[in-house]
């Protein structure tokens, strides 16, 4: 079936899904084959649950006129999303980066929603399936779309840009994330910068933090709207940044006191502030939006358990974000500090070295008790009163339950696979 015809059927539907567990009545289901499953087998179930149409790429699962046969389900989803994006023809803001993508996306969303009917990526649906699903969630009522893009190898951002065709782009930072797929930090810079290449080739606009020297250089020759604290010749000049523990940024005598912990969140706030200024949202409304945003999903949350105060940042971790979180925690004016740090994944050949660096970083300090959890950290074990190593979460839990802190401040951070939020149950 031609994409135009498929799109007409899509417009008749209430929603689109690739997961039969999320089928709505009157929706469209697109079957996508995976390495370990064949979603075509769920076509009949989708119709039984109320789907108006099912898109399949295996004629053996054809049911009736409600079944749409295509050559490839994933390709059909991506092409449908691209067509829908062109059909709506609304401004699209895309963002990527090593750290802070999802938080920044949420901040941009709450700011722009003060003036526009805005829709954004839900959660972190930011890959070759998530980006199309995000675009297809936009409707004719949507005035601005915000699309988060994730990547773990070269050419992925370029591919996602061809689908989303952003009018504006923002890169949070270049850090030590997904080193295995990108082939090192230089590979990360090259891969994430594919967004800049797209914006330049299409004469679109980049939002740029000019305090980041690499990004300043990469965007010097094309359209950009800039912000910075240290650099003076910018469109939005940040006057001051504080973090103790919540981040406050000041712009033209307006202090924005956020619910975000960690100085590393300052540029996430600054980016959303700059976009609000660009889209002519009054500063008082920008302030209201940013001060009203409360993080969730294990992202820099401040929690209290008994007599203990906890910074829970266990959604994800890489060497850059881990180092930033540690530095911020150690500089806070707190007593009885504990660091519970889990292994970082997807670092490839750099894994052993990066875990060793973090252990060495903390071995020289005496103000905090450090618990390293996971096999990669365990490889660096040594004996020191304030530093302990555990190969698994279970061995850590067994020790921790019999040595529970009180009146303490704890930072809990690790990669998603470590699920260090389980520590809360121990407290």
Image (tube, rainbow, N blue to C red):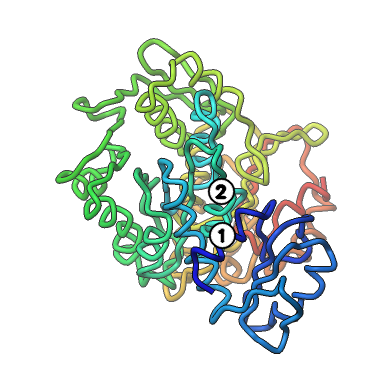
- Residue 400 seen by the camera: yes
Label located before the other in sequence (1 or 2): 2
Instruction: Please give the name of the residue rendered at 63% of the width and 59% of the height, measured from the top-left corner.
Output: 416
Residues 72 and 350: in front is 72
Say above or below: 6 vs 120: below
- Residue 390 position within the rendered picture, expressed as x and y whole percent measured from the top left: 68, 65
Say above or below: 238 vs 87: above
- Residue 68 position within the rendered picture, expressed as x and y whole percent measured from the top left: 64, 74
Say above or below: 70 vs 293: below
**Dot 2, how many residues are within 10 Å of its Cα: few (below 14), some (14-19), or many (20+)?**
many
Name the mark on residue 121.
2
Considering every residue shown, the one lying at the far bottom of the view is 60
- Residue to which mark 1 is pinned: 130
Instruction: Please give the name of the residue rendered at 28% of the width and 33% of the height, measured from the top-left corner.
Output: 226
Residues 111 and 365: in front is 111
Marks 1 & 2, CB-CB < 8 Å contact: yes
Quarter holding residue 1: bottom right
- Residue 389 position within the rendered picture, expressed as x and y whole percent measured from the top left: 65, 62
Quarter of the image with the C terminus is top right
């Amino acid at each position: 079936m031609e994409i135009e015809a498929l799109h007409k059927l899509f417009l008749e539907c209430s929603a689109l899904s690739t997961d039969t567990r999320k089928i709505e009545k009157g929706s469209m289901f697109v079957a996508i084959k995976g390495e370990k499953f064949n979603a075509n087998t769920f076509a009949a179930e989708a119709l039984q649950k109320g789907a108006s149409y099912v898109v399949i790429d295996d004629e053996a699962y054809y049911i009736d006129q409600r079944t749409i046969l295509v050559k490839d389900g994933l390709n059909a989803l991506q092409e449908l999303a691209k067509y829908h994006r062109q059909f709506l023809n609304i401004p699209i803001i895309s963002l990527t980066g090593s750290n802070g993508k999802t938080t920044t996306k949420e901040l941009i969303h709450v700011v722009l929603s003060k003036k526009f009917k805005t829709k954004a990526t839900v959660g972190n649906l930011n890959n070759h399936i998530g980006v199309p699903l995000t675009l297809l969630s936009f409707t004719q009522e949507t005035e601005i779309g915000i699309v988060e893009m994730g990547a773990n190898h070269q050419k992925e951002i370029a591919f996602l840009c061809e689908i989303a065709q952003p009018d504006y782009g923002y890169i949070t930072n270049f850090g030590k994330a997904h080193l295995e797929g990108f082939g090192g930090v230089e590979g990360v810079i090259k891969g994430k910068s594919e967004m800049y290449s797209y914006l330049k080739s299409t004469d679109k606009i980049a939002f740029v933090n000019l305090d980041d020297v690499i990004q300043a250089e990469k965007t010097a020759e094309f359209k950009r709207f800039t912000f910075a604290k240290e650099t003076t010749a910018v469109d939005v000049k940040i006057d001051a940044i504080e973090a103790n523990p919540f981040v406050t940024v000041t712009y033209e005598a307006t202090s924005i006191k956020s619910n975000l912990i960690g100085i590393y969140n300052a540029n996430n706030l600054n980016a959303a502030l700059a976009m609000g200024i660009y889209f002519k949202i009054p500063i008082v409304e920008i302030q209201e939006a940013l001060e009203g945003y409360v993080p969730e999903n294990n992202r820099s949350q401040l929690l209290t358990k008994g007599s203990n105060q906890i910074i829970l940042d266990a959604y994800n971790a890489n060497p850059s974000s881990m180092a930033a979180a540690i530095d911020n925690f150690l500089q806070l004016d707190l007593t009885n500090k504990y660091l519970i740090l889990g292994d970082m994944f997807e670092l490839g050949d750099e894994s052993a070295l990066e875990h060793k660096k973090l252990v060495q970083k903390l071995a020289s300090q005496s103000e905090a008790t450090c618990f390293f959890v996971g096999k990669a950290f365990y490889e660096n074990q040594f004996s020191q009163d304030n530093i302990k190593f555990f190969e698994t979460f279970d061995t850590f839990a067994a020790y921790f339950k019999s040595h529970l802190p009180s009146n303490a401040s704890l930072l809990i951070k690790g990669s998603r696979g470590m699920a260090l939020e389980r520590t809360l149950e121990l407290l």
